[in-house]
Amino acid sequence: MEFSFVNPTHIRFGKGQIATISKHIPSNQKVLVIYGGGSIKRNGVYDQVVEALKEHTWVEFSGVEPNPTMETMDKAVTIAKQEQIDFILAVGGGSVIDGAKYVAAAACYDGPGWDILTGKQRVSKATPVGAVLTLAATGSESNAGAVITRAETHHKLSFFAPAVRPQFAVLDPDVMKTLPEHQLINGVVDAWVHVCEQYINTPTGAIVQDGYAEALLRSLHTLGQQFHQRDDTEESGDQWRANLMWSANQALNGLIGAGVPQDWATHMIGHELTALYGVDHGRSLAIIHPSLLRHQMADKRAKLEQMGQNVFGLTAGDDLAERTVDAIEAFYHSLDVATQLTEHTEGKEQAIENILGQLEAHRMVKLGENRTITLEQSREILEMAVQ
């Protein structure tokens, strides 16, 4: 194992932590508060942020959509430049935080912001970012990645830059009390697949990373099993939300992926389902994941067998890996999450061609930890995953 790991994001976890924002942003800095719809005004989060920033000069930008678009976030970039913003505070879930990271990078660049997504512009400087997390799923609050969609072309791309990693993140599980059930379920699935992308790969003997990944998977599996009973008591609801928020953060803060092979093919293909058909991100992953694992069984058998025993408690046997994939799919189904794409309006074959066309346009022609999933193999996976 050879790797460099650093995660400087200061986490403030627990009830009432939104009030600590003022400790992390100098009072002489002008702040741009970025958020999504009106939910933070209905659940009291907005009022807490306003109180925390009472000694600051700040402006706001709202309307960040799920799967943030370049077109929307460029409006915030304009504000950041015109208002000479010193600090960006993202208040929301992964989409809002990803959008804020794009704004932070694009505000320090004179060219088109999309250059950052295509790799034409390498991000070395960005406006400082902080986050108030309202939805546990992506881990974006303490990592350096972001995913942005270009609505005009249905292109969905990612970028990674240490300069946009949030300096601090407030994680108050209480703010999730008013979230719709489908968003909580999306969070469980998203975090689960994040762990799998870094775990179900070529064995390397990294027992710390494997053990931590398995602990997270067992935790998320338990949270899924408890989903419909999570609010039986106030205490159980508080514990459920806190464990989800922390599990989702740990799933993608860089630790379990340090020094081990990482896949991300499920994400790359899933992104195209979201961009083309508006499938929720977490649910796009569930559609692709079981089919991809079955297709890549020859390369993933050893880790699937390890997962079957250490996460699901399955008995040994020649078909252990296959039963593990069945258990993963059953986990999604237990949350009423589909594992087949039905959102397309055209025929199955045309839908597959559309997805493959997007993958090719985005140069996603060699996917997986071994870069062996070609377009033809992606077609075979999609044949299994599209209904």
Image: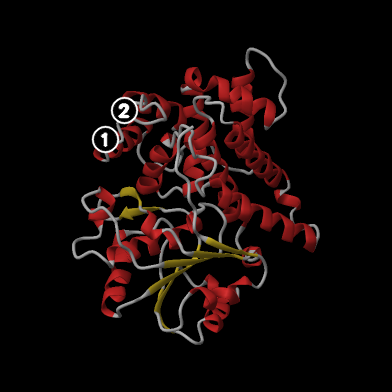
Q: Quadrant of residue 264?
A: top left
> Where is mark 2, residue-wise?
375
Q: Is residue 69 left or right of residue 137?
A: left
Are the two marked residues, 2 and 1, in contact with CB atoms closer than 8 angstroms?
Answer: yes
Q: In this view, does 303 lie to the left or right of 98?
A: right
Query: Who's the residue at 33% across and 48% down the image?
Result: 157
Q: Percent from the top left, x then y, of residue 150?
A: 29, 54
Q: Is residue 24 left or right of residue 378?
A: right
Q: Percent from the top left, x then y, of residue 237?
A: 74, 59
> Where is mark 1, residue-wise?
360
Element type at marker 1? helix
Front residue of 108/191: it is 108
Q: Quadrant of residue 107?
A: bottom left
Q: Is residue 194 left or right of residue 269?
A: right
Direction top: furthest residue: 318
Query: Who's the residue at 39% across and 37% down the image?
Result: 269
Q: How far apart are marks 2 and 1 (CA)?
A: 7 Å
Element type at marker 2? helix
Q: Percent from the top left, x then y, of residue 248?
A: 58, 50
Three-letter code, disc 1: Glu
Position of residue 154 relative to residue 106, above or below, is above
Position of residue 242 relative to residue 325, above or below, is below
Front residue of 232/2: it is 2
Direction bottom: furthest residue: 55
